[in-house]
Image (tube, helix red, strand yellow):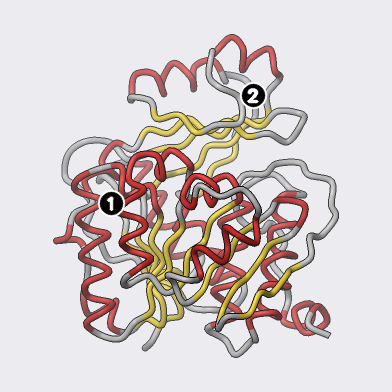
Amino acid sequence: MTCNVYGIGNALVDIQAQVSDEILEKLDFSKGFMTLIDEATQQRVLAALDGIPLSRGAGGSAANTVIGVAQFGGTGAFAGKVADDEVGNFFLQDMRDLGVAIEVPPASEGQSGTCVVLITDDAQRTMLTTVAVSGTLSPDDIDEEEIRKAEYIYIEGYLFAGESTKAAALKSIEYAVRHGVKVALTVSDPFVVNMCRDEILELIDGPVDLLFCNLEEARALTQLHDPADCAKFIHDRAAAVALTLGPDGSILMEGNRLIPIEGVSVEAVDTTGAGDMYAAGLLYGITNGLTWKQAGHLASHAAARVVSQVGARLAKPFTPEEIQELLG
């Protein structure tokens, strides 16, 4: 059986809590950013949330996108590493319940990765990530046969922050190129660009067919300012680019066409997963017969729906009828 998207990324269980600015100040983390923390610090954070309602679900950037593809009715598989512990078993079961295939064997030692997402009243999310065994994903965990059956592989840029995970990402790209499978890469965060800008430019000059980035990431990558200039710089190197502009929508470039996609006005509750769900809508669309403009339109509505609720996956997925209605 073929699958639309094979994602490669960090396997993290997202633990979400709505908190006051006061709690965030006490914990002393930069608001609105992702911070990598160790396992002991994560335990301190969870202790500070005692008594606050928590929700949890399988997550990580690429995992969220593959889940989104499955929620639209597409097919997905995922490569990510968990430990043989309660959190890891929860991750595997949650992914499989959502229809996402995951066959990477759990690590026999260590603990599974988590991402505590602290959401304040202004809809900002502060992410505190413990990668744990997720950071041990290696080329040995990448299944060439699974990649051969995919239409796209989708790689999260966070993998380039670690030697083992970077090697897994590059092995995935090697298999994809060997079997004529398209390669999509999401930049993930400006810190990834700052860490390995030359490497990302080399990838978009080479095997990457579709690059996802937001405006801050695009500016860091291209060292240009205007969104259209940034998109053109990337499209001169890669077959397609999806550059998101928050509430102002996005710019797609494909086949030397600039396709502006409108933003969808909603009241933002939690911006977690907006980019991940946008990527899900676009990848689902282009692997299921939609035009790039239609897929962008769907992606924009998907991102808007996910920011109007708490959590990085759609609490209320789009029905086939809603998708038809959206596409007119």
Residue 263: image x %, image y %? 79, 60
Residue at x-position 69% and y-position 56% = 315
Residue at x-position 58% and y-position 44% = 216
Residue 246: image x %, image y %? 71, 51
Is 199 situated above or below 325?
above
Q: Nearer the viewer, residue 242 or 144?
A: 242
Q: Identify the residue position indicated by label 2 in the image.
A: 52
- Where residue 37 sits, quadrant-wise, is top left
Q: Identify the residue position indicated by label 1 in the image.
A: 81
Left/right placement of residue 264 relative to residue 294 reads right
Residue 279: image x %, image y %? 56, 64
Location of the C terminus by quadrant is bottom right
Left/right placement of residue 264 relative to residue 10 reads right
Is 2 situated above or below 205?
below
The first of marks 1 and 2 along the sequence is 2
Q: Secondary structure at mark 2?
A: loop
